[in-house]
Amino acid sequence: MKNKFSIEKHIYPTGLALLALLVFIYIFNPQIDINGDNCYYYAFASALAAGEGYVDIAGEPSALFPPGYPLLMTPLRFITDSVVAQKVMNLLFLFGAVLLLFHTLLAVGVKRSLAFLAAATVLITPHLLEFSTMMMSEASCVFFIVLSLWAYMRVDATMQGTTAVSWRSIRLWVFLFSVAYAFLIRTQAVVLLLAFLAALLISRRFKIAALLAVVFAACWLPWALRNAALGLGQSRYVSQIDFSNIPGNIKMLVVQALPESIVPFMPVRYDSTPSPLLYIIAAVMLALIIYGFFKMKGLRVVLPLLFVGNIAMVSIMNTPSYYRYMVIVLPFVTAGLVVGLWSALNLLCERRLKRSLTPWVMLLLIVPAVYMNKSNSKHSIYGLHKMIEAKYPPAMLTYLAIGKEAAKLPDARLVASRKPELLYVHTGVRGKRIKEDNTNVDILNNLLDENIDYLVLDNMGFKYTYEVLYPFIKHHQDMFQMVKYTRQPTTVLFRFNKELATQWLTSRGYR
């Protein structure tokens, strides 16, 4: 019996490792994603590794993103400039989170085989994999959230139902630090702090709650004071707060994003009114998730608060971004769905058939994630695999080629372009984004204020480029000297003559 238990103890983690290896190899995409944010993370890590401080692609202090994820990337940047290495690290964070989730589910009383299936289902959730294979902060944030849950359960086990706590407990400090660091990775993770504080106060563990608040403040204050000292202001998410469409955002998140994000995968259209069937499916899924949370003794307060808190936080943003901000809670709601669904079906079998239901029936949940909706690149593992074949469009290739030419110029200290973050990662050239001003005076003043040396006129299809920027450059040809030019499609690098621009503005009383 002891030997059997020992085999089970190791076979499931080994199974998760093998599954992770197969999935990661199948969906791994070495190409830099063109979304832009991943490039900024890389730039911050590069600056930290070079001893330049927390500065952006223009070499200026920034508070665009919190420092947690770039700090995690920095050790690798000391060793290599490889983007692939950073992506592999992200996938390792995801695997670590899944492994910790498996052990956390065991700690809350979930059967070993069911905990394995829940963790495996999380591991093949397409949207979680989508962000984990990019240089984005979701995977590392998920890891620290799960680490905090795992450590919390270990602390809870040592307390044995009392309010006493050992301050020398390593697990206690792991718990406290993980909650704080998750917030330093993604501001959205403040809901984790609130969920734990509420759970600790409800269980009358006031000392731990107070210590959590102190550790959180100690980790956050240096970042806040640094931003205040540099006049960088508060988190960019604060500016996105908007209370005007809370009901609509909640409906979108619960009725559309929830069924779309969790296995079994159900692609939905966000630009159309949800069908009555989708409302029913969302309601059933929500009920099963909450039921699954209830079955997890020890986390039945924290997990619902974490889930509801995340919905509440995202709902007050003016750009809730569909499923994007659901990603960090996907492991828990997916596990809740698996545990809740099996528990409900098992209860039905025991009452009607007088027998238990094998947890392995949950394998049916994995099939949709692997192959469902294969035509959509983000809705299945197969779709993620097909994205590897996608290449940069010709306009992007010529844009990057021009960036490489700019990097060779000794006086190209700052280059204005549409996507300067991509140029930085691919070529190392520093730059700033072209501001979409409409008057000649505003455009010139901004180029001078930003101290721009060169400007890239791309052909990537942006309306502003054709309607405003191109006519503006054509009208002021004396201020913009063509340096490099590519065809198919046309992309041009111009040298900006600051002296002529200043003279033009001054002569008209604009400077």
Image: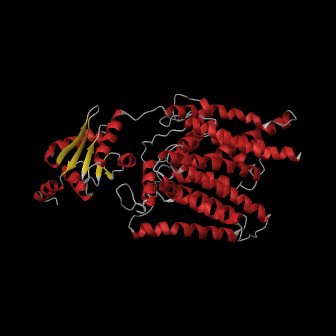
Residue 87: image x %, image y %? Answer: 52, 46
Q: Is residue 45 visible?
A: yes
Task: Give the farthest residue toward the front.
Answer: 79
Above or below, 19 against 447 in this view is above
Q: Nearer the viewer, residue 477 or 300?
A: 477
Write the residue at 16% across / 54% down. Answer: 501
On the image, which quarter does residue 24 sit in? top right
Task: Give the farthest residue toward the right.
Answer: 1
Above or below, 193 against 461 in this view is below
On the image, which quarter does residue 167 sit in? bottom right
Above or below, 372 against 414 in this view is above
Residue 323: image x %, image y %? Answer: 53, 43
Write the residue at 76% across / 42% down. Answer: 11
Residue 386: image x %, image y %? Answer: 51, 31
On the image, which quarter does residue 275 sit in? top right
Colour logic: secondary structure
* Count of numbered marks: 0
Q: Quadrant of the C terminus?
A: bottom left
Q: Is residue 339 visible?
A: no
Q: Is residue 230 left or right of residue 90?
A: left
Q: Quadrant of the N terminus?
A: top right
Task: Give the farthest residue toward the left.
Answer: 507
Q: Nearer the viewer, residue 481 or 283?
A: 481
Q: Nearer the viewer, residue 85 or 37?
A: 85
Write the residue at 63% across / 67% down. Answer: 212
Residue 149: image x %, image y %? Answer: 67, 56
Q: Nearer the viewer, residue 456 or 279?
A: 456
